Image (cartoon, rainbow, N blue to C red):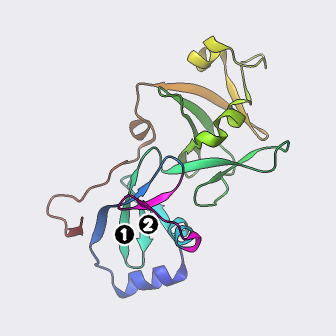
Amino acid sequence: MDALVAQAMQRWPNVPAVYGWLRLDRRGRWRIRGEPVVHASTAAFIGRNYLADERGRWYFQNGPQRVFVDLDACPWVLALDGPPGTSLALRTHADRPVGAPRSAWLTAEGSLLVEFESGVGLVDDRDLAAACAGACDGSGAPLDEAGWCDPAAVGARLWIGEHALPLAALGSIPPAARFGFDPQPRPDPGEDACT
């Protein structure tokens, strides 16, 4: 969190939160009231001050005010990091390195999620084919159609850089329920809030 933001929180501790204004789309773009945030410095400021509360609600700490974020997919959108032909790593939409990923999941719609220390992220669809190229079964062979349908049954792994992640299907479980985040935070009854 930026130092100026922390100072503002101390000066004005009781500013009403904002709900329903800020959204993170499936490609990692911030949107305010549906319009994309086009200034790189503004997007970077939001990303630096992007946090989660104890209830799994993600927000942007804008000075003393929490601006809760509606999530089109997951709290993070992930992109492959590194030049083609090199060992791949992942980076978040907020330009943070992922570090050591823990597991990979396929959704019913065909999206790829990666769980890591800071939560779970949707792999950007523009990087999906390159990320999935590192999938293999328990014997190291590329996944066939049956393996993609039931990756856990064949001991599937997804290689991201030097990390071999267990790959499984979420099935009908919504990502928010499986990973404990609120995709559409709204004020509690009686809460003083901006909507």
In the rendered image, the residue lying farthest to the left is 190
In the rendered image, the residue lying farthest to the bottom is 11
The image quadrant that residue 62 belongs to is: bottom left
| Circle 1 residue | 66
Badge 1 marks a residue whose secondary structure is strand
Q: CA distance from mark 1 to mark 2?
A: 6 Å
Determine crowd level at label 2: few under 14, some 14-19, many 20+ residues with C-alpha closer than 10 A.
many
Q: At 60% from the left edge and 14% from the top edge, which residue is drawn?
A: 153
The image shows residue 141, relative to residue 94, as above or below, that is above
Total marks in image: 2
- Chain part drawn in magenta: 28-41
Rendering coords of residue 96 (x, y %): 64, 59
Q: Is residue 95 magenta?
A: no
| Circle 2 residue | 60
Q: At 35% from the left edge and 74% from the top edge, which residue is drawn?
A: 65
Determine crowd level at label 1: few under 14, some 14-19, many 20+ residues with C-alpha closer than 10 A.
many
Q: Is residue 157 left or right of residue 77?
A: right
Q: Amino acid at mark 1?
A: Arg
Q: At 55% from the left edge and 49% from the top edge, which residue is drawn?
A: 77
Q: Is residue 33 magenta?
A: yes
Q: Nearer the viewer, residue 174 or 126?
A: 126
Q: Amino acid at mark 2?
A: Phe
Q: Is residue 136 left or right of residue 56?
A: right
Q: Which mark is residue 187?
A: none
In which quadrant will I find the C terminus?
A: bottom left
